[in-house]
Structure formats: C-alpha cells, structure tokens
Amino acid sequence: MRVLIVDGYNDEPGGLGVPPYIDVYPRLIAGSFWLADKTTRVDYVTVDQFRASESYWLRRASQYDILVFIAGVVVPGKYIGGDPARPEELVKWAGLIEGPLKILAGPAARWGMGLEGGKPAYPPSAFERAGFDVLIRGDVEEYFTDLARYGVEKASPVRLRRDYRLYDKVARLGARIVRKHPRLGHGLIAEIETYRGCARWVSGGCSFCVEPLRGRPLQRDPQGIIAEVEALYNNGVRAFRLGRQADILVYGSSGLSREEWPKPNPQALERLLHGIRSVAPGLEVLHIDNVNPGTIARHPSESEEALKTIIKYHTDGDVAAMGVETADPRVARINNLNTTPEEALYAITLVNRLGRERGPSGLPHLLPGLNFILGLPGETSETYRLNRSFLEEILSRRLLVRRVNVRRLLPLPPTRAYRMKHGVRGRLEKHARSFTWWVRREFEARMLSMIAPKGTILSRLYVEECTHGVCYARQTGSYPLIVAIPCNTLHPTLYLDKVIVTGIHSPRSLQGLPIPIRRDSRVHHREAMEKLGYRNMVVEDPAAPKC
C-alpha cells in the first residue's frame, strides 16, 4: 500500500500545525498504517511544497492508493512559516486527482474551515461535494488503523477514542514521519497532546468554541506522553510544546471530566515535565500554550504551584495564552465566557510575578498572551471602550504581555454563536478597526519596548527569510519575536548565536544586529553598536556575519 499525506496545516483552539509546528495528525496517520504493516510506504509533503510544484504533485498523487489531506483553520491568524491550505484549493485538488481513495482529515472535515474571521466558513459538506471520498469526523487513529487492517468498508470515519491506548502506540510509531518535514533541524516544534476537550463542557463552554463539542475530557497517561516525546527526540526533534489542551494547569486533575473548574494538580505536572526532561535531555525548547485565567482566579494557590512547576522544567521565552476574548461583562455572560476582567487581571499579575525574570534566551521566563475576539454576540460600542480600558490598565500597572491576538469571529456551524446574531455590524465596524489599530500601533509597540528594550541580547535565532536587504530572524518558541536585521548576506536556515536589539522595526517586530559584527560591516551598524556601549562586540573575525 502506498499512502501520501498532504499537510495543509491546521489551527484550532487545541492544536497548531502551521510551520514551524507539526501537529499530531500526520504522526497519528502515519503511525496507524505502520502499526498494521511496518512496510507500508507513507510519504509526507507540506501544502507549501505541493503548491510550489503543483503540476508534479497532481500527477504523482494519482499513483498512490490512498491520498490524505489534512486541513482546517478554525482560529484564523497571520502566519510566517507557512500558508495553510485554502478551501478553494482543497475543492480544486479533490476534483483534479483521480485514482486514489481521497480522504480529508483535521478540523475541516469535522467542523468546517475558513481563513478569515468575520466571513462564513466552508461547511464539511462542501468538501464532500467536491470529490473527497471520506471525511474523518471522528479520531484519525481509530479510522486509519481500521482502514489499514480491514479496508474501507469496515472503517468508520466517525469512531471516537475511548482511551489513549491506541493513540499512544501510533504516536510513537508515527514519530519518524517528522524526518520528511522540511523544517526538521530548523526550528521544527512538535505539538504534544495532553488531553482532549475542555473542562467547561459541562456548561456548554464558550459560545464560539469547538473544544467543548468534543464531549467529556479524556486525559493521557504521562508515560504515553513521555514515550511519544522520546520517539520524536530520537528522530531529531528538539523543540516541543504542550499545546493540545484547553488549560495545561488542570492536566492530571481528578475533577477534569466532572467539574467545570477543576483544581490544578501540580504533582501530575511535575511527573510529566520531569519525565520529558529525562528522555529528551538535549531539548532546546519546552513550552506550553493554553492557560485558563478563570482557573487561576478560582484556585490561586494550586495554580501558583502549577506555574512554578512549569517554570522549573520549561525553557524561557514561554507564553501562557489566555482566552480573555472580551472585557465586557455583558458580552461574557451572553457567550458563557470563562472569566471576568478582574479575574483576568489577577491571572496576568500572577504570571508576571512568577515568570518575569529573564532567562538565557534574553526573554522573560513566562508571560501571558491575550486573545480577543471581535464580533461576539451582544457586542456594542461600549464593548470596544471596555476592551481598550482593560489593556490601558495593564499598561498603567506596567504588567508585561507577550502578545495580543485580535481576531474576528469565525462562525462555525456546530457552535452556538453561529446560531446567534454575531459579527461586526454597521456602526461597530469603525470601533473594531479603531481598537485593532490601537492594539497594533500603540499597545504592542509600547509592550515590545518593555519586553525587549534596546541593548537586550537574544540568543540562538534562525533566519526565516531575506528580502530587500532585510533578513528576518526569530527564536524557536511558542510566539517568537521577529527581529529585522539590515543585512543581505545572511541565508535562510542560518542560525545566529547572538543578536542585540537596537530598536523597534514595526509595532510587532524588533530591529537588531548579529554579534559579534565584523569591523568592515556598514558604518551605521558599527555606530549603532557603539552608541549602545557594545564597542567590544565589533570584531575582526572574518567568520562573523558581514552586513
């Protein structure tokens, strides 16, 4: 059997697969086939590679027995490392490719997808009509294991896992698919799942979110997670993120599947993180993603211990992403959101107190990241005033926030928000644009100057791309800072050991210079270094970057 996986990338509340990330889907699919028959040929290509040689891949795809597309952006964002598959592309490719069994997996198959908030999403039925033979609405490892063993007639695309035993097996076996990823050795981050679902499923969860729709949360045994990390590490991965969960603080909590607000279990996190460090001793990045500010507000002492445990084992430059969504209490009630502005400020303050100290990367150990959604049911002009006041209060207290994601609601058919009056309508459009502009141009610029002021030395950045005499580099991590380097002699895939921050390039990026810098580099670079008091970093070394 010959299988081709086309990774169209995914972005969902509990998982990210846009480069430099590789999510669980390709690994589970490949592992499912190899569990049934280790001689199965499984090839992997990213959608960016597919596009770059579209005619070649369209011809080659027809030579496989099974063709799997992974896709689904349900939390739209702006991406630097890759361009997710667009619905129109999936429809076109499904119609052009003949021969193999064509399968769509990922959020697109289960919930639908879109690439831009504020616009209708493509429902799953649109992809069925386009020519896909199977849409996986259940768990991928359940379907593909049965498909490989028993054939398409006996494989159910709606089967859900009841535990993680099969998942753990195929995740380990599928780890070697990362060898085919073009970013391996160049900042590739493996997304790791700790549990599925959201504790707030008992109350229906947030109106716009698909995570509560997964039902009762199901947790992985720490040994299964540790074994998966070990397999990935042995196949060359050096960066990991515990990102596929609604709230990392409640991993291992005995109340996770029964209570809306379970208590954190710091001991469970200790076992998990210590185990990961034991099997991946040379890892370069160990980060987290989602943290529920409501958990911190309701269980402050347990949350503090859990955060201290994370900081003990992780790598610095980490971000605790918090779904604040709105600072309007009325909108929060209408949409059954997870926190009030006062609770969110408490959580932000606690994370600052524990994680503000800088680590070897040059950045603070752990900072909050905030998510806002525009166009929620119940919004008024007052909503935008309250949102801005909330962020101004953060500035006035000199609290640090690593980033603020402002998105427009992407209404997915299965969610309650889809059936409610939603969207940025009429007079609210100017308020939405004004708020977004203020966040981008003022709030984030001021925050960036506090997180990485002039003279900050950042370590180990990789060059992402160079254009028009400027190279863009960033560290490996959850939400890495972009550093613009005025230089046209660097090359993508190059690692820079040290970069000194010389200023702000844009509201969301820094300007910097690699160090040491050669004496024959352009004069204004040397002057910039000397003004910052780093004259000794200008060297004669011919191996140092010349800009």
Image (cartoon, rainbow, N blue to C red):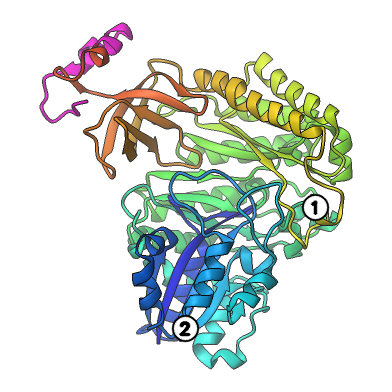
Disc 2 residue crowd, few under 14, some 14–19, many 20+, Cα 10 Å: some
Separation of marks 2 and 1 at Cα, in angstroms:
41 Å
Which residue occupies 26% across, 16% down? 525
Which residue occupies 75% across, 58% down? 212
Report if the CB atoms under discs 2 and 1 are less than 8 Å apart.
no
Q: Quadrant of the C terminus?
A: top left
The percent position of residue 19, horizontal first and vertical second, equals: 44, 52
Asked if residue 460 is positioned above or below residue 503 in the image, the reply reads below
Q: Is residue 275 left or right of residue 375?
A: left
The percent position of residue 139, horizontal first and vertical second, equals: 62, 72
Query: What are the residue bounds of the magenta stretch?
Result: 527-547
Which residue occupies 51% across, 29% down? 508
Q: Is residue 167 left or right of residue 540?
A: right
- Quarter of the view holding residue 234: bottom left
**Front residue of 202 and 410:** 410
Q: Quadrant of the N terminus?
A: bottom left
Residue 546 magenta-drawn?
yes
Residue 115 magenta-drawn?
no
Residue carrying label 2:
98
The answer to whether any part of residue 169 appears in the image is no
Q: Which mark is residue 449?
A: none
Which residue occupies 35% across, 84% down? 39
The percent position of residue 111, horizontal first and vertical second, equals: 69, 64
Residue carrying label 1:
205
Asked if residue 107 is positioned above or below residue 322 in the image, the reply reads below
Three-letter amino acid code of the residue under disc 2: Glu
Provide the secondary structure element on which disc 1 rests.
loop
The percent position of residue 374, horizontal first and vertical second, equals: 74, 39
Which callout, 2 or 1, points at the residue further toward the start of the chain?
2
The answer to whether any part of residue 21 appears in the image is yes
Three-letter amino acid code of the residue under disc 1: Gly
Question: In front: mark 2 or mark 1?
Answer: 2
